Image: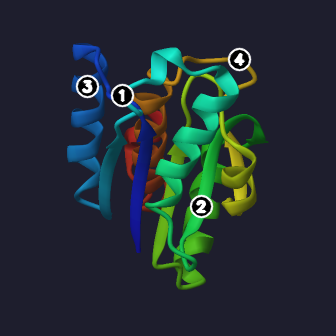
Amino acid sequence: MRITLLLTGKTDTPWIKAGMEEYTARLSHYIRFSVHEIIPPKNFRQLSPLQLKEAEGKLILKYLAEADQVVLLDECGQLRKSEDFAAWIQKMMNAGTRHMIFVVGGAYGFSPEIYAAASQKLSLSTMTFSHQMVRPFFIEQLYRAFTILRNEPYHNS
């Protein structure tokens, strides 16, 4: 299986980038994982929130294939404990899922087309995080899931 984290906008804070790089490197021991940043339209500052969601949605759709398992990281998504998330990842691998794409939207969320394309919504917390902060948090949780599946001590250290 291959996992992609699809991001709307650039990661522009150095310490967030460093955290993402750290856990991406750790993940490479377990699974093929990549991060793709979608660059927003050039005129995005002049767009209304609705127009921006629509424009970002069109860009996101270009990365999705019909066979992909698309999971939106969304504040209204399902909450899972780390162990449950790990078990769900294992279930996806056992089911023969070839490609999972986790999508982090922009500041205003997703367009209706993206919600329709997704098979699931996942929330990292009942608190709201910026779309920048979600990036390293999610990659760390994905790494944690694989250490749980391998019965490694990271989860309990």
Which of the marked residues, 2 or 3, is nearer the chain's N terminus?
3
Tag 3 or tag 4, which sits nearer the N-term? 3
**Crowd around label 1: few <14 · some 14–19 · many ≥20 (10 Å):** few
Q: State whether residue 116 is above or below residue 153.
A: below
Q: Position of residue 56 (x, y in %)?
A: 53, 40
How far, Cα to Cα, is label 2 from label 3? 23 Å
- Residue that appears at 57% across and 56% down: 86
Q: Residue 127 carries which label?
A: 4
Kind of element beneath mark 3:
helix
Quadrant (top left/top right/bottom left/bottom right) for the N terminus: bottom left
Task: Report the residue marked by disc 2.
Answer: 70
Task: Say which residue label 1 marks.
Answer: 42
Q: Nearer the N terminus, badge 1 or badge 3? A: 3
CA distance separating discs 2 and 1? 26 Å
Which mark lies nearer to you, 2 or 3?
2
Q: What is the number of the mark on residue 17?
A: 3
